[in-house]
Image (cartoon, coloured by chain):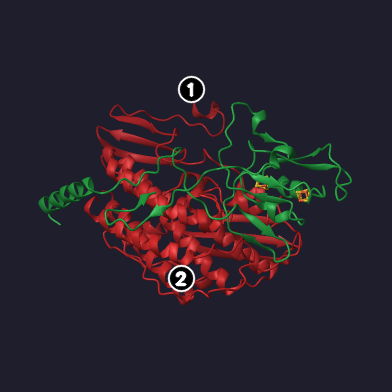
Amino acid sequence: MGTATGIIKALNSGIKHLAVKRFTLRYPEQKLKLVGDGYQFDPSTGVGIAGYKGRHMLFHDHCTGCQLCSIACEGVAEAIAMVKVQEDWKQNKKAIMPQIDYGKCVFCGLCVDACPFYALYMTNDYELSSFTKEGLIYTPAQLQVKPNIAQDVELKFDNPRGATHG
Amino acid sequence: MSSTSLPPGLQIEKVDERIMTLNVGPQHPGSGHMRIIVKIDGDYIVSADPDPGYVHRGEEKMAEYRNYILNIPHLERPVIHDSCNVLYPYCLGAEELLGLEVPERAKYLRVIASELNRCVYIQYWLAIYGIFLGHSTMFMWPAGDRELLIDMLEKMTGARVTHSYFVPGGIRNDVPANFEDMLLKRVNYFEKRIKEYAAVFAGKLSREDAIRLGTTGSTLRASGVNFDLRVKEPYDAYGELDVNVPVLKEGDSYARSKIPWLDMLESCNIIRQAVQKMPKSGSVRVKLKPNPKGGNDEVYKRVESGRGSLGCYIVSRNTPEPYRLKLSVGSFRNLICLPYLLKGEKLGNMPAVYWSLNYWPVEADR
Ligand code: SF4
Ligand code: SF4
C-alpha cells in the first residue's frame, strides 16, 4: 500500500467513525445484565451452573458448619473464617458458619464447589467497596441477605452503525 | 581499587566517553515490571540487556503445597488476560497423571474458551502496543472491542478476566442457555471490527536466527517458520478442527504485530467451526474423588498460548500435591532475541521492537 492511499484510507475510516454509535457503557448509571443468579454448584452431579462469580450468599438453614469451604479456601486466599453464630439449627450443632473477608477473596468459587450441602452460592453483586478494611468482612448474617441490584443493560448488535450498550 | 577486593558478583565497568547507560524501567515500561539496560551512542543503541525478575511470584513453589484443584486459581495469575491458555497445559498434564478422560463436549468448550481468551489477550496486547507507539486509536479500538469477548467469557465462566474455568477432568460449569447464538453474534461482529484495523496499522529477525534463539509463537511465525502447536501437536478438540496458522516472512516489528492480528481472524474461524461440531449436550466434567492422588509419574504437556508455546512439566510422587511443577513460557524465550534486535537500532524504535516480541513480564518471571 502506497503512503498516499494509506493516508486516504485512514482518513476515510476516521470520517466513517464519526457516524458510528458510541459503544461505551455508562457505568454506574447503566449496569450490564449478567446471566443467571450467580455461580452455583450441584454436588450431586459435580458440575457448576453458569453465573457471575460475585459476592457469596449463605443459606443458614442448609449450613452444617462442616468447614469444607474454609478448608478449600485455605489453599487459595484464606478468606473464610468460621465464626460462632447465635442461632439454633438442628443440622448445625457447633453453631459455626463461614465469614468471608472480601479483601482477600479472589472470587474463584472453589468454596462453592466444596460445599456438599447446597449452602453456599455466589450472586451477581460485585459492588463491594468500603471505606474501611472491616467493612469488607462479611459476617454470616450479612451473607444471608439477597442482593438487590438493577442490572438490565444488554449488548445490542442490531444497529447497522455498530454495537451499543442498551 | 582492584576488582579482586569487590564483593562477589560486582564488577567495575570501563567507562567510554561516548557511551551512555540508560535504565528503561523497572517502573512499568508497558505492562509488568521489567528493566532494559540500554547503552547508547548518540541516538543509536550499542547494546541492550534485558533484566527480568521483578515480578517473580514463586508460582512453581506454591504449586508444590496445593492439591490438583487448589492449584487452579494461582496458576492462571501469570497472564490474567490469557488465563484459560495458561491453565490449559496444567490441566492436560494433571488429567494424564490422574487418569481422567475429558468428555467430548468439554473438549470443544475448552477450545472455544481458549480461543476467546487468545483474542482478549491479543486485543489487550495491541492496545498496550498502541500506547507504546503513542497511537491513541490503536489503544481505544482494541480496548473497546475486547469488551465484547470479555462479556462473552463472563457469561460463560462467571468472571471477566481470571476465569478459573478449566479443571483437571473438564470445565467447571456448562454454558448458559442460547450460548451459541450469543457467541456467534459477538464473534461475527468482532471479526468485522478487527478487519477494520487494517486501515490503522524496525528490528529484523531472520528465519535462521529465530530458530537458533529458540523463539516461539508470533515472533517465530513472523520470521517465516510455520510452527504452531495447535497444528503440530493438536490437543483436545484441535485435531478435529481446521486451523490455518498465519505465517509471514518479513521478520520485522510490523510482521510481528500483524501475526497476532491475523491470529484473531483465525480464532474467529476456529470458534465458528467448534460451535458447529460441538456435541449439543452431554456431560462437561468427570467427577473427581476428593484429594485425588497422581501416581509415581511425570508428564510434559504444551499448548499454543497467545505468546507461543507454553509447557507444563509435572512430577508426581503418589501425593495429592505435585512433587514439582515447572512452567516453560513463551515470553521468556522470546525475550532472548531482544539484545540481537536492538543492536544498531535507534533508541526511539526500542518500544516498537520490545513490545512486538509478545513479551509478558509477569509470565516470564512466573
Ligand atoms: S471464592 Fe475463592 S477466594 Fe473467595 S472465599 Fe471462595 S474459595 Fe476463597
Ligand atoms: S457453607 Fe457449606 S461447606 Fe461451608 S460450613 Fe456450611 S455446609 Fe460446610
Q: Which subunit holds the residue at mark 1?
A: B
Instruction: Name the residue at the left extreme.
Output: A4
Foreground tag (1 vs 2): 2
Q: Which subunit holds the residue at mark 2?
A: B
The amino acid at mark 1 is Met
Residue at 28% of width from left, 59% of height from top?
Answer: B195
Q: Which mark is residue B275?
A: 2
What is the drawing colour of chain A? Answer: green
The amino acid at mark 2 is Val
Is residue B197 visible to the viewer in this orientation of the structure? yes
What is the drawing colour of chain B? Answer: red
User: SS for tag 2?
Assistant: helix
Instruction: Name the residue at the top extreme.
Output: B1
Horizontally, residue A148 falls left or right of residue A73, namely: left
Q: In which quarter of the image is residue B298?
A: bottom right
Q: In which quarter of the image is residue B101?
A: bottom right
Q: Residue A60 carries which label?
A: none
Percent across and percent down for residue A3 are: 12, 51
Horizontally, residue B66 falls left or right of residue B148, namely: right
Residue at 45% of width from left, 34% of height from top?
Answer: B26
Q: Closest to the observer: B229 or B10?
A: B229
Q: Closest to the observer: B40 or A130?
A: A130
Q: Earlier in the sequence, mark 1 or mark 2?
A: 1
Give the Cα separation between the discs numbered 1 and 2: 70 Å
Classify mark 1: residues with Cα within 10 Å, few (<14), some (14-19) or many (20+): few
Percent across and percent down for residue A136 are: 64, 33
Percent across and percent down for residue A134 are: 67, 29
Q: Name the residue under label 1.
A: B1
In the image, residue A28 sits, relative to residue B6, either above or below, namely below
Percent across and percent down for residue A109 are: 64, 51
Residue at 34% of width from left, 53% of height from top?
Answer: A163
